[in-house]
Image (cartoon, helix red, strand yellow):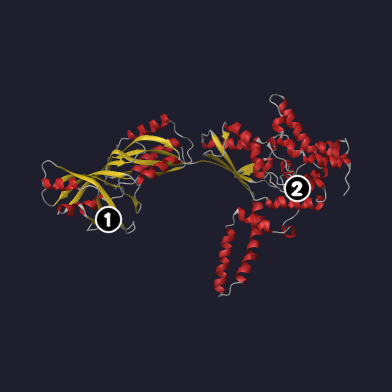
């Protein structure tokens, strides 16, 4: 096809658009001329576009930023406030070759973009809220900043995540429409066979800078604070669901036709396919779309796509990765469980370590909820003494990360509770490394105990020597009878590292047993034998009956939180 000089200039300029935009930062100098240089880049870019195609795109409802995307324009240009329909006025005047009043009027966009559904026009609606429609980038940024403030989030950095409806069908419809009309023109072959900026990337380029300013926080991919924008559009979803259902029905018929079985088996196979279609992911839908040949696509989707009369609904979610408050706890009561304990909706014990610590930390961090993790556990009737047991409180979506001063106040608040059931020490704020540190040491830890024991005969001096002489003694423990309802029946080999007996003044059959064992040893069963399920045991060693009356954990030997 022959081209005139003007068309050749348009094609040449179009090829240079990417270079112009990529060189923007090199051309723009600091100071008052920066805005002027940016304006010139945009003006040059606009003049490089084929005016007849731009008019066509505007007439079918494509927004300004989507036009720039389709022509392969890259860079920070998407954050410019100049990208509105009026930017094309000079191009339209040039195409008309007229200076009359009609040609000077700005071209009109459809209400919402037929490709991006209004996302790059910064229009949206919210539940129980009127439509927000504007060409202003700050529209969305201010809505996000308002939400962050209302939710009470304190952030110094953020990562921006954007979820949008699948618009692949919209883009392809526009592409096929342009291909049919302009496929033989050089600008189409040059620009529309190259990869272009996605709606997500263009949106992020547009709002990130203003969002950083409003939040006084930097955008960082690795930030623990994530701002997620969920855009949904009912019409787009229905169209794709209808397409996927048709696609799945075709597959299902092929599958059922190939199965020779009873009628009931066929019905079941069809039901399974239906369940799978209901759970289609975005990636699966895109794969289904990509399989379609152009002619088949045009049979299922309109080209160009229908104009859009309503915008996407916007949901804003701000979420911080879990923070961990680590330390050690001591438990002074024999009627406090480690975690909340309910049986048939009836509480066991007067309180729990989990509730006392977590319930006081959560309000300070202003999180959604918490999880309590400890390096092992003691029974409700066992005290935790000595240096305490390492623990972590995992705070979900904390709005506030405590400072060292706040941590000190937190520790003092828990330790000054009137009941004095639990005490904490060495509290500190940790990242995920706290979890790793605690779990690495848990399997290797040793634990020390003090047990008040009764034996069926008087204690002899040689009993003290016998017990003291036993070092690193191996015992075999079957799962105790008292926990068989919730633990697997296993044989566990454990080590008793050392033991010693302390006499109780005025008593011949009561004694204090001090011992150090491998993690996971059942101490109560080691004393009384658990009907022979633990062997050897204290009773078998002393050749008498032995019963444990009270038990305290006196040390948990782990490096963390010391």
Percent coordinates x, y for residue 221 in the rendering: 57, 39
Query: Residue 158 — which label?
Result: none
Measure the C-alpha gap from mark 1 to mark 2.
72 Å
| Element marked by disc 2 | loop
473 to 158, vertically: above or below? below
Label 1 secondary element? strand
The image quadrant where one finds the C terminus is top left
Q: Is residue 145 left or right of residue 477?
A: right
Number of callouts:
2
Front position in the image: 409 or 548:
548
Rendered view: 293 above or below 446: below
> Image quarter for residue 251?
bottom right
Q: Is residue 107 visible?
A: no
- Can I make out residue 457 in this image? yes
Q: Quadrant of residue 276?
A: bottom right
Tell me where residue 156 appears, x and y as whole percent: 53, 33
Disc 1 crowd rating (10 Å Cα; few below 14, some 14-19, many 20+) is many
Residue 353: x and y, percent? 34, 42
Q: Are marks 1 and 2 in contact (CB under 8 Å)?
A: no
Identify the residue position indicated by label 2 in the image.
192
Q: Earlier in the sequence, mark 1 or mark 2?
A: 2
In screen coordinates, is 330 left or right of 279?
left
Viewed as shown, does residue 336 lie left or right of 198? Answer: left
Q: Position of residue 257 (x, y in %)?
A: 62, 72
Question: Mark on residue 477?
Answer: 1
Q: Residues within 10 Å of mark 2 (few under 14, many from 20)?
A: some
């Amino acid at each position: 096809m022959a081209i005139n000089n003007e068309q050749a200039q348009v094609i040449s300029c179009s090829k240079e658009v990417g270079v112009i935009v990529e060189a923007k930062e090199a051309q723009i100098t600091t100071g008052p001329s920066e805005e002027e240089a940016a304006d010139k880049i945009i003006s040059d870019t606009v003049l490089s576009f084929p005016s007849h195609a731009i008019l066509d795109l505007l007439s079918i409802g494509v927004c300004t930023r989507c036009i720039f995307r389709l022509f392969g324009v890259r860079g920070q240009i998407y954050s410019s406030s100049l990208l509105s329909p009026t930017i094309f006025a000079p191009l339209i005047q040039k195409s008309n070759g007229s200076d009359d009043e009609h040609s000077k009027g700005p071209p009109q966009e459809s209400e919402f973009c037929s490709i991006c559904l209004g996302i790059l026009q910064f229009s949206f609606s919210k539940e129980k809220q009127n439509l927000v429609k504007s060409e202003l980038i700050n529209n969305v940024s201010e809505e996000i900043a308002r939400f962050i403030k209302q939710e009470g989030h304190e952030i110094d950095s953020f990562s921006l995540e954007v979820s949008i409806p699948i618009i692949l069908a919209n883009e392809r419809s526009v592409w096929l429409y342009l291909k049919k009309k302009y496929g033989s023109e050089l600008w189409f072959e040059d620009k529309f066979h190259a990869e272009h900026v996605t709606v997500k990337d263009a949106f992020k380029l547009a709002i990130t800078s203003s969002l950083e300013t409003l939040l006084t926080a930097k955008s960082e991919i690795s930030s623990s604070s994530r701002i997620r924008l969920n855009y949904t559009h009912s019409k787009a979803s229905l169209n794709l669901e209808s397409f996927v259902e048709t696609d799945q029905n075709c597959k299902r018929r092929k599958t059922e036709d190939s199965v020779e079985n009873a009628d009931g088996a066929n019905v079941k196979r069809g039901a399974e396919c239906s369940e799978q279609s209901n759970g289609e992911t975005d990636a699966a839908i895109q794969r289904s779309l990509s399989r379609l040949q152009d002619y088949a696509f045009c049979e299922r989707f309109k080209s160009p796509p229908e104009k859009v009369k309503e915008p996407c609904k916007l949901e804003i979610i701000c979420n911080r990765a879990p923070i961990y408050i680590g330390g050690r706890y001591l438990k002074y009561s024999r009627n406090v469980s480690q975690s909340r304990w309910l049986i048939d909706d009836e509480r066991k014990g007067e309180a729990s370590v989990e509730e006392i610590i977590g319930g006081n930390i959560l309000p300070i961090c202003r999180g959604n909820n918490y999880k309590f993790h400890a390096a092992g556990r003691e029974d409700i009737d066992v005290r935790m003494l000595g240096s305490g047991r390492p623990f972590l409180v995992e705070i979900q979506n904390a709005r506030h990360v405590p400072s060292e001063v706040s941590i000190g106040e937190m520790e003092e608040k828990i330790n000054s509770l009137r009941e004095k059931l639990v005490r904490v020490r060495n509290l500190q704020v940790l990242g995920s490394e706290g979890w790793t540190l605690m779990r690495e040491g848990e399997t290797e830890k040793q634990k020390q105990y003090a047990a008040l024991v009764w034996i069926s005969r008087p204690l002899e001096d040689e009993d003290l020597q016998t017990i003291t002489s036993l070092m690193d003694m191996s015992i075999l423990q079957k799962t105790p009878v008292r926990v068989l309802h919730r633990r697997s029946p296993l044989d566990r080999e454990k080590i008793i590292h050392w033991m010693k007996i302390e006499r109780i003044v005025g008593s011949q059959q009561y004694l204090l047993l001090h011992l150090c064992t491998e993690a996971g040893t059942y101490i109560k069963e080691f004393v009384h034998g658990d009907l022979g399920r633990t062997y050897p045991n204290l009773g078998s060693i002393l050749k008498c009956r032995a019963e444990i009356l009270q038990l305290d954990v006196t040390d948990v030997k782990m490096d963390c939180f010391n």
